[in-house]
Amino acid sequence: MTRKKKASYQKRHKGFLNKAHELNTLCDVKLAIVVYSPYHEEPKVFSNHEAITNTFTNFKKLP
């Protein structure tokens, strides 16, 4: 990957997580975000493990 792509990714990733945090805080919305990228060995997650597990469990229960 080029440096420009990595810089663009980092900028957009930060903005994306900021918007997710705002949505979570201001609107009391439950969020679970998992981001896989070639720049990290492990996925980056928004929220904590327990909250993500609960969100995905609730999602799977939907009809």
Image (cartoon, rainbow, N blue to C red):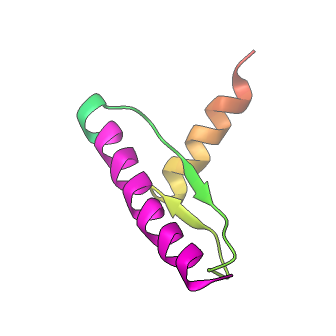
- Residue at 42%, 67% (x, y): give it: 11
* Mark count: 0
Rendered position, 52 above or below 45 = above
Q: Nearer the viewer, residue 60 or 17?
A: 17
Q: Nearer the viewer, residue 14 or 6?
A: 6
**Magenta part mainly helix, strand or loop?**
helix
26 horizontally vs 50: left or right: left
Q: Which residues are magenta?
A: 1-24
Q: Nearer the viewer, residue 44 or 11?
A: 11
Rendered position, 7 above or below 57 = below
- Residue at 38%, 56% (x, y): give it: 15
Q: Is residue 8 magenta?
A: yes
x, y percent for residue 26: 24, 34
Rendered position, 6 above or below 31 = below
- Residue at 56%, 84% (x, y): give it: 3
The residue lying furthest to the left in this view is: 26
Q: Is residue 18 magenta?
A: yes
